[in-house]
């Protein structure tokens, strides 16, 4: 259902299920960030469950404990998602909690201070992982113009210094109903759930939509980057630009990537691991994007076999 505010809701009913899930997708991610805001989308994801208008302080966390629900969130390059998994008896209250957290976050100063430390530590751990480092370098190399090159996890110096005002301004700009989809699936009463969504998410005020980032990337010359570090294994990350999500050959590209390196029956695995014993592990992935996608191959190997 499409509301006057622009918000979309989707109900997927399974009356035989004793559980349900409520998920809200917000079309904002690292592609929407400027260099001075690198990582703010994910930072807001961390902060949104830290108190809201109708569930201030620890009221949110107490409800979670009382209901025994599972709540979490995730940020990608193109969207942020928030979800609650619950017993079907708690659908109504879970939806109210989720709607209030997304529509009326308080962003308490003390919670911002706490989460800064958490997120900065996560960034540091991320950059200690060779696979993660190569992933970041690959995206910054293969995308020259497209904001798909932006890191999801962001930069520690940005998280350390971004102000409460900047966080609120970024939130107000992107957390608009036209950029949101609310989905409920599992066992629930269809009419009651539709009414709850209308009374909560459906009341979000319509707002102007910020300009969408251009995610297309033109073909360009490739680069080879070699770096040395104090690690025992060698890691390789290579790839090329591919179809976007609207292309007719998007399924062909996904199938080709699977044949090439999708599991133990793939050609790369059989050849480089099974027959020639050149790698410890190898895999290929078709990363489909709203803009220009890519296909990349990752491998781990003994350095002398590079």
Image (cartoon, rainbow, N blue to C red):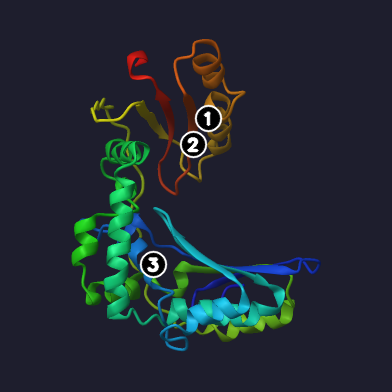
User: Which numbered disc covers residue 286?
Assistant: 2
Q: Residue at x 53, y 26 (%)?
A: 261
Q: Could you tell me which quadrant the C terminus lies in?
A: top left
Q: Position of residue 144 (x, y in %)?
A: 26, 40
Q: Position of residue 52 (x, y in %)?
A: 42, 83
User: Which numbered disc covers residue 137?
Assistant: none
On the picture, is 2 further left or further right than 240?
A: right
Residue located beneath label 3 in the image? 46
Q: CA distance from mark 1 to mark 3?
A: 33 Å
Q: Are marks 1 and 3 in contact (CB under 8 Å)?
A: no
Q: Earlier in the sequence, mark 3 or mark 2?
A: 3
Q: Could you tell me which quadrant the N terminus lies in?
A: bottom right
Binning the other alpha carbons within 10 Å of mark 3 as few (below 14), some (14 to 19) or many (20 upward) gives many
Q: Are marks 3 and 2 in contact (CB under 8 Å)?
A: no
Residue located beneath label 1 in the image? 257
Q: Are marks 1 and 2 in contact (CB under 8 Å)?
A: yes
Q: Earlier in the sequence, mark 1 or mark 3?
A: 3
Q: Position of residue 141 (x, y in %)?
A: 27, 36
On the picture, is 35 further left or further right than 183?
A: left
Binning the other alpha carbons within 10 Å of mark 1 as few (below 14), some (14 to 19) or many (20 upward) gives many
């Amino acid at each position: 259902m499409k509301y006057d505010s622009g918000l979309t809701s989707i109900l997927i009913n399974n009356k035989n299920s004793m559980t349900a899930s409520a998920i809200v997708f917000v079309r904002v991610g690292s592609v929407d960030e400027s260099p001075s805001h690198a990582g703010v989308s994910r930072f807001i994801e961390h902060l949104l469950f830290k108190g809201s208008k109708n569930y201030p302080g620890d009221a949110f966390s107490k409800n979670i404990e009382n209901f025994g629900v599972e709540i979490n969130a995730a940020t990608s390059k193109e969207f942020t998602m928030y979800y609650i998994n619950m017993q079907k008896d708690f659908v109504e209250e879970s939806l109210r909690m989720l709607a209030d957290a997304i529509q009326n976050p308080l962003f308490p100063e003390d919670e911002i201070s706490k989460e800064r430390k958490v997120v900065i530590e996560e960034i540091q751990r991320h950059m200690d992982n060779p696979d993660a480092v190569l992933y970041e370098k690959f995206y910054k190399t293969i995308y020259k113009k497209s904001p798909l090159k932006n890191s999801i996890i962001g930069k520690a110096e940005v998280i350390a210094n971004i102000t409460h005002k900047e966080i609120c301004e970024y939130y107000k700009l992107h957390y608009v109903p036209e950029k949101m989809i609310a989905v409920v699936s599992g066992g629930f009463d269809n009419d009651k759930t539709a009414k709850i969504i209308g009374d909560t998410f459906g009341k979000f005020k319509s707002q102007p939509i910020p300009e969408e980032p251009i995610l297309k990337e033109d073909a360009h010359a490739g680069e080879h980057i070699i770096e040395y570090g104090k690690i025992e294994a060698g890691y390789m990350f290579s790839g090329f630009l591919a179809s976007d999500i609207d292309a007719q050959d998007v399924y062909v590209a996904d199938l080709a990537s699977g044949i090439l390196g999708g599991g133990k029956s793939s050609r790369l695995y059989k050849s480089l691991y099974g027959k020639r014993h050149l790698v410890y592990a190898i895999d290929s992935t078709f990363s489909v994007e709203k803009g220009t996608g890519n296909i990349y191959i990752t491998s781990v190997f003994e350095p002398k076999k590079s």
